[in-house]
Image (spheres, helix red, strand yellow):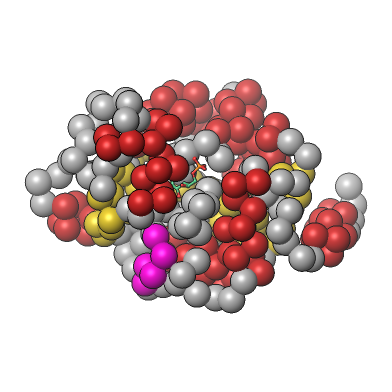
Amino acid sequence: MQVVILDSAEEMGEYGADEILRDIDAERLDVLGVATGSSPLPVYAALARRASPAVAGLTAFALDEYVGVAHDHPQSYHWVIHRDVTVPLGLDPARVHVPDGAASDLAAACSAYERQIADAGGVDLQILGIGGTGHIGFNEPTSSFGSRTRIKTLTPQTRRDNARFFATPEDVPVHCVTQGLGTIMAAGRILLFASGLGKAAAVARAVEGPLSSMCPGSILQLHEHATVVLDREAASELTLTEYYRFVFDNRPDRHDE
Ligand code: F6R
């Protein structure tokens, strides 16, 4: 796992946009995995500023969706992805996919979502955030490392963390559908973004802690191409910070820059 520590949200966004555009240029990125939440917003903003026609040609798959929330509800991830990703990046809405949490048969909708990802050739690059519980997607602690898209129950902590987006804490849905850890791990490359002190403990457990379903993000230690992009606050509970900075400053793939 590579750990990149940057000084500001803007730098994190520019870093993410550079990596995405580099992969598109190298013809290894057609299908982008997108996350909702605050963490990836600087990346979407930086990509939107570049206004690259190559970005507009991407297919996108979102990680998760609340159960029982209509697609046009302002807090549904269908709506949030449309507002934060599809419109600013100029993507074709027909090529932007979000799990269907409003389906009458949720299990069938989850299986169909897995098939859609497979039919698109799989996710080439997955953008992630991490929750205070260590979740990635909405895979809360004790999620199976082999899990696929399915229904999950949010933890009280995640419901409290996400209450800021709803009128009252009780309005936060209890259930969600989310890509599984096995689904996420099948992506060719992963970029996880986290900022702020509130993420420091979860980041330290995911990056340096033991591999454990108690911190679902720790599964990224098994991914061949996972990069964790942090600000100083989110990196503050890591022990090998100096080494991560040294590795970044001496990247073997950048010796000619
Ligand atoms: C969002 C998602 C979640 C968030 C995580 C962090 O689609 O799957 O895992 O990435 O809850 O949220 P923020 O970025 O709002 O702190």
* Residue at 65% from the left image edge and 62% from the top image edge: 204
Most common SS among magenta residues: loop
Q: Is residue 125 above or below residue 91?
A: below
Q: Is residue 8 visible?
A: yes
**Is residue 142 found inside the magenta-colored segment of the image?**
yes
Number of numbered markers: 0
Task: Please state the horizontal and vertical placement of residue 233, each as a whole percent of the image.
Answer: 71, 46
- Decide if residue 146 is on the left or right side of residue 152: right
**At 39% from the left edge and 70% from the top edge, which residue is drawn?**
142
Q: Is residue 3 left or right of residue 151?
A: right
Q: Position of residue 209 (x, y in %)?
A: 62, 71
Q: Is residue 116 visible?
A: no
- 67 up-or-down from 11: above or below: below
Stretch of the chain drawn in magenta: 140-144
Q: Quadrant of residue 97?
A: top left
Q: Is residue 209 magenta?
A: no
Front in this rendered view, residue 144 or 2: 144
Out of 210 and 40, give the one closest to the viewer: 210
Q: Position of residue 199 (x, y in %)?
A: 60, 50
72 horizontally vs 44: left or right? left
Looking at the image, residue 166 lies above or below residue 239: above
Location of the N terminus (image quadrant)? bottom right
Task: Determine the residue positioned at 28% across, 56% down.
Answer: 153
* Picture quadrant where residue 202 is located: bottom right
Q: For the point 56% across and 40% down, which residue is it? A: 39
Q: Residue furthest left?
A: 104
User: Where residue 189 sits: x, y (%)?
Assistant: 56, 58
